[in-house]
Image: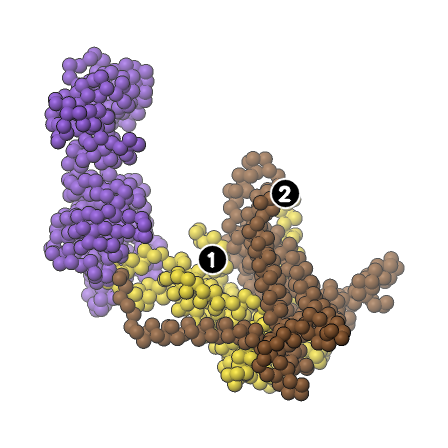
Chain colours: A yellow, B purple, C brown
């Protein structure tokens, strides 16, 4: 009885979460120009439009990809020394640095967005694609910082002592012991940042300053003219990318551990 | 081959004294065990020797040269860790040849050396296995092979058997001892297991609360403990408080003769020490040193029986050979005889009682 | 002493890198703070200054003391109102779910986690789009209500009139947006997967043996939850509500699409001032600072609430 009840509850939750996503995705099949649910006159024409023929979407998608990949890579590169310093030294300075580096992610993004408008405005870079990349790198720095810290925590410090007694200095130990064991965590941090940057709206909305648009910005801009089924193709693309990446992380990494579950008994 | 000498070495962690000032000498080619309860400073001492911990004061002399300022990677003393610390991202052979790889030795030599070492520890066919596929005993052998790969001057082991179960531990102790004697390498083993120390060591250093209590061969430590702590930490011991006299010791209203009075003056407070297996139990009062008591507990271990008695001078334990016909029961009244040549006088224990 | 020092250029590069990160993460916030004291020049941009007129305008209106306007306080109130209700709703419904989920096998847990991570990262614009389609008058739920005869039934029983009082219906059919209901529903949906991910670590550490121990002492399941489970996760639950609240304070798209203009929030008005129609950066900054201070205040009091349990 209790089992049945809990299964029903979990099933209901699955529907509640999945339903709006499914609705958006199915709307892409609409034959006409208007969004209907259920879709009218199903067709795959919208996919060709989104990926190939409609320049506005093709360009937005390319921008989204550049910003996501660039900022995720930058975030990982910036997070490594901070996470490493925090783990190796754990003094107040490295704790403060890690705390400040996580601040943009923890506070309402709209405030950070406003600040970035001023910041890039002074730097004369507002509306540049690269300033968008840097903005997202800082915004999502907290993600690789977290996965790397979790990974470093799980490294047995006796491994470092062992390497030292065999003649390895700090740089060699880093290269031969720490880095190879940290690859899954580095990759997870990269992909977490990538997926979130890909889907982020408000900050890129501010810093793009109409200089360029990513898919999310383009969709919001088209909002005033009403939704079109082509936008739903974007939704399908995005959810597919997320599903693919998180499945890969789950397959090759320990997702429960990355999300902070008790990892003493991995199975 | 060089001797290792610690001179005036001391270690503090903030206010906490992990190791009081001490001198120690490790003879080349011998196996020394650092023995003591957990928290006695033995691991800190080993880590200072390895270079993983800097001494607060003192010299570490290898063949007469001070190496205290060298880092662990410069000393390259091979070390086996309590958790084995095998690298999970490398296979067995690559773990073993790790030190050679970072020293820039070519791949062919590395492979040959790894095979040679794995043969030495009887794991020749496991070179390509992942660490997780090995049993605890196999992992320990890999850890030993890995530490020996760099041909270290000093070989260090930190509680190497603590992760193994009892039967395996017995086998590995013998194996380690034989390997060490074959290679003739200066070896230092940290352990809290007195039996293990007795099995493998040429020399035992007994430690407690950051101090060295006694240094000696296993026989010396067992039969002539320097004080009450060593006596009770190594095996069972009967320790009775008394006062030295001209010819022996008085325990309350009983007087015992002893063979050696040590340096104690008449009237000094002393502790009388006797191993349980030296105590004899009789039903009629014997002529020599003896106490009358009542049996409070009997433990039958098959090969031996342990009889606990309450006597006027204190609680004592006698260990007698096990036998099927033995009929001693709780409540029996017996005489415990202490042969004069088995008794030793030790400095009086602190009031609270050590160990 | 134990490690050889790395080469000097390496250290310098690392310090420089940390410095850049620090500048990029902190300076934007400092700029917002500094500019909030600036002065808007009519018909032009703005200049550095140090005056409190922007804050005065926020609390009592620009024209004070001749007239008083609480327009922006109302925006702030709606920011807090939507965010608080949605974050509490999300945690209240997500907690039992997470508890059930963590009792499943590690493999099944991983599948659920992938599912929630996908929905968590799914852009706010798409989520708003999904609910917009679902609640739009020409398709989705209102159409479903009409087609299934539910609307007619509501008309007959007078339920439609009650819904009209709540702003959820027109005389002809149900109408879900724009409304407070649609805003809060979408916000709840938006943070629901966050609630799962944040509650997952503490709840997964609730040991089954502790629960079994309580049961062997005669506690029924409901009693176990009340006396053992909830006290153990009190702090993470309050912490999660606070984090979701801070996150939702800045929600933009949902409010822009689903809330009636009269019930808009500070984030809309911040955007209007900084990048939108009114172009008054100093006033926008002042509003952003107040949003931040609100977040900080709620976090501060929330923490105190957690660290001083009742009865002490």
Mark 2 highlights which residue? C222
Query: Is A195 rendered above or below residue A259?
Result: below
Q: Give residue C191's quadrant in the image.
A: bottom right
Q: Give residue C50's quadrant in the image.
A: bottom right
Where residue A135 sits in the image (x, y, percent)? 52, 76
Residue contact between numbered discs 2 and 1, judged by CB atoms under 8 Å? no
In the picture, measured across the screen, residue B318 lies left or right of residue C296, that is left
Where residue B333 sits in the image (x, y, percent)? 28, 14
Image quadrant containing the N terminus of chain B: bottom left
Residue visible at 59% across and 57% down?
Answer: C301
Element at badge 2? helix
Query: Is B99 rendered above or below residue A29?
Result: above
In the picture, measured across the screen, residue C64 lies left or right of residue B38, that is right
> Within 10 angstroms of label 1, few (less than 14), some, or many (20 or more) residues?
some
Q: The numbered mark 2 sits on a residue in which chain?
A: C
Looking at this view, is B304 or A229 the one in front?
Answer: B304
Mark 1 highlights which residue? A257
Instruction: Establish whether labels 2 and 1 are both on one chain.
Output: no
Query: For the residues marked 2 and 1, what is the alpha-carbon distance in whole angstroms?
Result: 29 Å
Element at badge 1? helix
């Amino acid at each position: 009885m209790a089992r049945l009840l809990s299964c029903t509850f979990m099933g209901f939750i699955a529907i509640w979460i999945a339903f709006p996503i499914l609705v958006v995705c199915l709307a892409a099949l609409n034959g006409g120009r208007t969004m209907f649910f259920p879709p009218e006159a199903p067709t795959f024409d919208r996919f060709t439009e989104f990926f190939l023929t409609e320049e506005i979407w093709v360009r937005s998608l390319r921008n989204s990809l550049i910003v996501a990949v660039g900022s995720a890579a930058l975030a990982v590169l910036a997070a490594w020394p901070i996470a490493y310093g925090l783990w190796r030294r754990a003094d107040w300075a490295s704790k403060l640095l890690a705390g400040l580096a996580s601040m943009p992610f923890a506070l309402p993004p709209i405030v950070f967005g406003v600040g970035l408008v001023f910041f890039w405005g002074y730097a004369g870079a507002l509306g540049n694609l690269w300033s968008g990349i840097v903005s997202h790198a800082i915004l999502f720095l907290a993600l690789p910082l977290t996965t790397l810290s979790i990974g470093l925590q799980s490294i047995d410090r006796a491994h470092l002592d062992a390497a030292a007694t065999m003649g390895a200095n700090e740089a060699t130990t880093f290269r031969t012991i720490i880095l190879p064991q940290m690859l899954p965590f580095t990759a997870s941090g990269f992909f977490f940042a990538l997926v979130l940057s890909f889907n982020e709206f408000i900050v890129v909305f501010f810093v793009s300053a109409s200089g360029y648009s990513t898919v999310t910005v383009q969709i919001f801009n088209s909002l005033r003219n009403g939704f079109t089924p082509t936008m739903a193709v974007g939704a399908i693309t995005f959810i597919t990318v997320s599903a693919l990446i998180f499945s890969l992380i789950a397959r090759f990494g320990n997702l429960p551990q990355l999300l902070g579950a008790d990892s003493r008994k991995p199975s | 081959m060089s001797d290792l000498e610690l001179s005036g070495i001391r270690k503090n962690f903030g206010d906490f004294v992990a190791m009081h000032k001490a001198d120690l000498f490790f003879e080349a080619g011998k196996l020394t065990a650092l023995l003591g309860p957990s928290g006695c400073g033995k691991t800190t001492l080993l880590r200072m020797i390895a270079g993983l911990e800097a001494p607060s004061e003192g010299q570490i002399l290898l063949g007469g040269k001070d190496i205290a300022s060298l880092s662990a990677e410069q000393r390259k003393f091979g070390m086996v860790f309590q958790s084995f610390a095998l690298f999970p991202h490398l296979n067995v052979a690559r773990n073993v040849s790790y030190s050679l790889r970072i020293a820039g030795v070519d791949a062919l030599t590395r492979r040959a050396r790894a095979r040679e070492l794995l043969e030495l520890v009887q794991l020749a066919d496991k070179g390509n296995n992942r660490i997780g596929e090995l049993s605890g005993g196999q992992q320990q052998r890999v850890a030993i092979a890995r530490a020996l790969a760099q041909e270290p001057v000093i070989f260090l082991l930190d509680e190497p058997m603590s992760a193994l179960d009892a039967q395996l531990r017995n086998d590995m102790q013998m194996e380690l001892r034989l390997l060490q004697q074959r290679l003739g390498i200066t070896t230092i083993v940290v352990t809290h297991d007195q039996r293990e120390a007795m099995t493998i060591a040429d020399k035992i250093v007994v430690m407690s609360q950051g101090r060295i209590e006694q240094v000696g061969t296993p026989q010396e430590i067992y039969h002539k403990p320097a004080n009450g702590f060593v006596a009770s930490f190594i095996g069972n011991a009967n320790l009775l408080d008394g006062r030295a006299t001209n010819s022996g010791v008085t325990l309350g209203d009983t007087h015992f003769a002893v063979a050696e009075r040590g340096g104690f003056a008449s009237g000094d407070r002393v502790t009388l020490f006797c191993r349980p297996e030296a105590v004899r139990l009789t039903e009629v009062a014997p002529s020599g040193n003896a106490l009358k008591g009542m049996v409070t507990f009997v433990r039958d271990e098959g090969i031996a029986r342990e009889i606990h008695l309450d006597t006027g001078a204190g609680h004592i334990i006698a260990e007698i050979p096990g036998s099927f016909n033995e009929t001693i029961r709780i409540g029996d009244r017996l005489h415990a005889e202490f042969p004069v040549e088995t008794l030793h006088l030790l400095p009086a224990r602190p009031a609270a009682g050590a160990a | 002493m134990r490690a050889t020092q790395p080469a000097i250029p390496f250290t310098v590069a690392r310090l420089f890198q940390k410095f850049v990160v620090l500048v990029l993460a902190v300076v934007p916030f400092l700029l917002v703070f500094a500019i909030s004291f600036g002065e808007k020049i009519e018909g032009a941009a703005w200049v550095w200054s140090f005056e409190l007129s922007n804050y005065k305008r926020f609390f009592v209106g620009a024209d004070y003391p001749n007239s008083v306007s609480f327009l922006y306080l109302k925006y702030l109130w709606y920011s807090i109102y939507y965010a608080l209700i949605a974050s509490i709703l999300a945690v209240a419904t997500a907690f039992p779910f997470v508890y059930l989920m963590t009792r499943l096998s590690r493999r099944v847990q991983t599948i659920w986690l992938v599912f929630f991570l996908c929905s968590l990262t799914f852009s706010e614009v798409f989520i708003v789009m999904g609910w917009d389609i679902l609640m739009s008058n020409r398709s989705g739920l209102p159409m479903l209500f009409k087609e299934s005869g539910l609307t007619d039934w509501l008309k007959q029983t007078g339920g439609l009139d009650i819904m009209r009082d709540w702003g959820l219906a027109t005389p002809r059919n149900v109408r879900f947006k724009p409304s407070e209901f649609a805003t809060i529903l979408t916000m709840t949906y938006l943070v629901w997967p966050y609630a799962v991910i944040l509650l997952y670590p503490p709840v997964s550490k609730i040991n089954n043996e502790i629960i079994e121990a309580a049961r062997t002492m005669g506690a029924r399941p409901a009693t176990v939850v009340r006396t053992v489970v909830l006290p153990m996760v009190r702090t993470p639950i309050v912490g999660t509500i606070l984090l979701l609240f801070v996150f939702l304070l800045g929600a933009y798209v949902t409010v822009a699409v689903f809330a009636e203009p009269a019930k808009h929030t500070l984030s809309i008005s911040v955007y209007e001032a900084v990048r939108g129609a009114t172009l008054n950066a100093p006033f926008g900054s002042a509003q952003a600072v107040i949003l931040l201070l609100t977040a900080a205040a709620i976090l501060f009091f929330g923490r105190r609430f957690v660290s001083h349990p009742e009865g002490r």
